[in-house]
Amino acid sequence: MKNRTRYLLWTAFGVLLLAIGTVREVTGREDETVTGMFITSGIIVLLFAGTRAMRQEEGPEQDERTRKIGAYGITYAWFLTVLYLFALFWLENMGVLALSSTDVIISTILLTTVSAKVFQWWLFRKGDVE
């Protein structure tokens, strides 16, 4: 399937999700959480389809070094996330900190994604992994 057709299908899917969410919101008879999920999903699909359609080139060519640095950066990020969750567990057990499950989930997602990019950036600047 050509890229243009693929992007059009993803755009149509995003518009469909957004339309379902909007109709559910206007009628007001449905659960607000489900309505929010439809609207959010539609917006995210549209954003991804738009950014992929606007991309001009494939990006830098990947070689063994690039893949190795990427893998190490993600590995370090996952290890940092495990340490973070371990620390949260003990802080909660000792009564020092009390977070809701939503706070834990969003902070973990942010920590993992941001730290993966930071570790990869740092390793690329360093030059190689050993």
Image: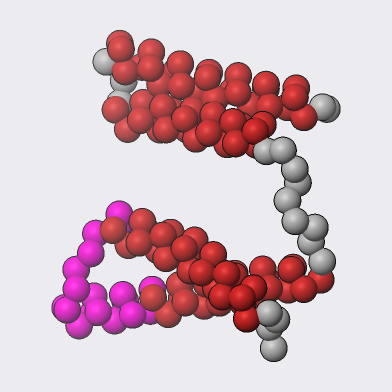
In screen coordinates, is 75 left or right of 81?
right
In which image quadrant can residue 28 be found?
top left
Please indicate, yes or no, whether residue 28 appears anywhere in the rendered image.
Answer: yes
Residue 23 coordinates in the image, percent (x, y)? 38, 13
- Farthest residue, direction left: 95
The residue stretch that appears in magenta: 85-102
Residue 31 coordinates in the image, percent (x, y)? 30, 26
| Towards the viewer: 89 or 111 | 111
In which image quadrant can residue 119 be found?
bottom right
Please indicate, yes or no, whether residue 75 appears anywhere in the rendered image.
Answer: no
Residue 5 coordinates in the image, percent (x, y)? 75, 22
In screen coordinates, is 68 left or right of 64?
left
In screen coordinates, is 2 left or right of 29?
right
Q: Residue at x 53, y 33 (%)?
A: 47
Residue 57 coordinates in the image, percent (x, y)? 75, 43
| Towards the viewer: 67 or 36 | 67
Q: Residue at x 64, y 27 (%)?
A: 10
| Towards the viewer: 13 or 2 | 2
The vertical placement of 26 against 66, above or below, is: above
Which quadrant, please, contains the C terminus? bottom right
In which image quadrant can residue 123 be found?
bottom right
The vertical placement of 30 against 120, above or below, is: above
What secondary structure predominates along the stretch shown in magenta?
helix
